[in-house]
Image: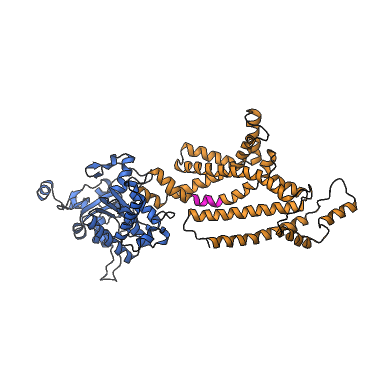
Chain colours: A orange, B blue
Amino acid sequence: MTRYIVKRVLLAIVSVFIICAITFFAMNAIPGGPFNSEKALSEATKQALEARYNLDKPVPVQFVLYLKNLMHGDFGVSLKTGRDIKDTLLSCFKVSGRLGLTAAVLAVITGIILGSLAALFRNRLIDRIIVFFTTLFTAMPSFVFATFLMLIFCITLKLLPVWDASSKSLILPVIALAAYPTAYVTRLTKTSMLDSLGQDYIRTARAKGVPMVKVIFKHALRNALIPVITYVGPMLAYILTGSLVVENIFTIGGLGQQFVKSINNRDYPMIMATTIFLAVVMVICNLLSDIAYKVVDPRITLD
Amino acid sequence: MQILDGNGHITQGKVLFKGEDITKYTPKQMEDFRGRHCAMIFQDPMTSLNPVYTVGNQIMEAITTHNKVSKEDARKKAQEMLELVGINDAPRRLKQYPHELSGGMRQRVMIAMALVSEPSILIADEPTTALDVTIQAQILELMMELQKKLGMAIIIVTHDLGVIAQMSDEIVVMYGGRICERGTAEDIFYNPCHEYTKGLLRSIPSVSNMKKKLVPIAGTPINLLNMPKGCAFCARCDNAMKICLTQVPEEVRIDKTHLASCWINIRDNKYLHTEEAEVKA
C-alpha cells in the first residue's frame, strides 16, 4: 500500500510537470501580454517592467527560471495586483474549498440515499419523482438553476439574502453547486443498486434469513458504491476548485473566478499557479478515490 | 422460501413444515424460518457469495442472524463449520475473501454457511452444476456424510440423473412446474411410468455402447408463461394422445410408493384402483 502511494505520488509529479510545461508554452502563445492595456504605457516603462519580470527573455529560458523559483516554493507575485500569489490562492481556495466540500458531501449523501430509494421502489411513484428531478438537474445548466434559485428565494420569497457576509448567503451557492453531482450520483447509485440487488449473493443472504433492510444496506449498497466512487473522485476535484458560473452569479471570490480573471489579464504567474494547484487537487482526489476503491472492494489490488 | 422477485408467487397449495403451513407465514416469520429451519445452497458458488465481505463475516452473519451469540462464539462456530465441511486451515480461510477461494471451496463455504444453525431441511439447487466432475463427487459425498451426521433432510434439485441416482431415496420428476411422477429411486429408475421420465432415462449416453447415437427429447422446454390446457409435456411426447392436448392427466397410484400423472397409464389400465391401493397401502 505504502509502495503504491509513493509510486503514485512520483507519477503525479511527472504529470504535474507536463501540465506545467504545456500551460507555460500555451499561455505564452496567446497574443497579448500583461502590460498591454487601453492606456498605453511608454515604451521605456514597458521594457523596464518586462525586464523586471523576465518577460524580455526567450520563452524556454523563462520556463527554466520559473521552475527554479517553483522548486523553492515561490509562485511569484501577481503581475496585476503585485500581491503574493500563494496568499491570494490560499484565500481563494478557502472560499471555494469550503463551498465545494459542503456541496460535495451534500451531493454524495443525498445522491446515495435517493438512488437507493429509487432502486428499491423501482417504477413506483417515488422512483418516478426522483427520476424526473435527476433528469431535470442533469439537463439544466447551472447558470439557469442558480438564477432561478436567486429569483425564488431572494427576490420573491425574500427568505435569503442576495449577498452578505453571513454563512446564510452560502446556502444557495451550495445548492446550485450540488445539484448536478447529486443528480448524477443518484442515477449512478440507482443503476448499480438495481444491478447488485439482482445478484446471486443477495439471494444467498435472503436465504440465510437476513432481514431485508440489512440485505440492502450491508450486502447490496457496498457493492453498488463501487461505480459511484469512480465518479466521486474527479467530481470532488472539480467542485473543490470552484465553479466559474456559480461563483460569478453569487459574487463569491473563489478559485474559479480567480482563474478566469488571471487568463483575461494575461497574469502569467497567476495562470501557472492556478493550473498547478488545480492539477495537484485533481491528482490527490484521484488517488483518494483509488484508495477508497481498495477499501470498498477487496478484489482490487493496488500495484 | 419466498426469495424470488415479486413476479413469483404461490398460486395454490400448501407447504407443510412440522404440521404448519409456511405459505401462511408473515414475512417476519419467513425470515426466521429461512436459514434456521430450512437452508439453501445454490447452483453457482462463484457468484453466490458476496465478493466484498470475508468468508468468515458471511458465515458469522448466518449464525448471528438466528442466535444471540457473541462475536467470538460466532467465530469459533464458523471455524468449526469450515472444518466440518473439510476446509483445512480454517482460521486463515475465515479471513479470506470469496475470490481467493476455488469453486469447490466456495461451495463448501456455502454448505457450511447453510448448516450453521442446523436446519431440518437443506435445499440444494443444482449444487454441483458449476463444478467439475471430481469436485462434484467430493461435494456430493460431503453432503451425504453431513446428512447422516446432522440428521437433516436434503431436497436436491437437479437434471443430472447420475447425481439423483447416487443421492436420492425419493424422487419427484417435474416438468413445466407440475409433478409428473414420484416414487422411490428404484421405482423411477427401473419402472418409469411417465413419458418424460422415460425420455430422460433414454437420453443418458451409454458407456458400454459408445457408437449408439444419443436419444434426445425432441423439441424445446415449454414456455411457462404460456402453458397448454392439457399435459405440459404433450408437445414433446412421442406417444401423445388426443386427451393429452385437452386435459391435465390425473395422478394415479402405480404401486405402494409410486405415483404418476400420465394418460397412458390410465389407458393401459396400468394402475391400482382405489380398493387395491387401499389394500396395498
- Residue B219 in percent (x, y) is at 33, 56
**Residue at figure coordinates x 50%, y 46% from the top left:** A189
From the viewer's side, name the closer residue of B261 and A175.
A175
Q: Is residue B10 visible?
A: no
- Residue A203 in percent (x, y) is at 38, 50
Q: On the picture, is B186 further left or further right than B22? A: left
**Residue at figure coordinates x 50%, y 56% from the top left:** A294
From the viewer's side, name the closer residue of A67 and B1.
A67
**Residue at figure coordinates x 10%, y 49% from the top left:** B276
Residue A226 in magenta stretch: yes
Q: Is residue B45 visible?
A: yes
State which quadrant residue A22 falls in.
bottom right
- Residue B252 in percent (x, y) is at 18, 49
Determine the residue located farthest toward the left in the rendered image: B279
Q: On the picture, is A48 further left or further right than B52? A: right
From the viewer's side, name the closer residue of A223 and A2.
A2
Q: Is residue A88 above or below residue A6?
A: above
Q: Report the number of discs.
A: 0
Q: Which residues are magenta?
A: A225-231
Prevailing SS of the magenta stretch:
helix
Q: Is residue A19 above or below residue A119?
A: below
Residue A9 in magenta stretch: no
- Residue B151 in percent (x, y) is at 22, 54
From the viewer's side, name the closer residue of B192 and B97.
B97
Determine the residue located farthest toward the top in the rendered image: A157
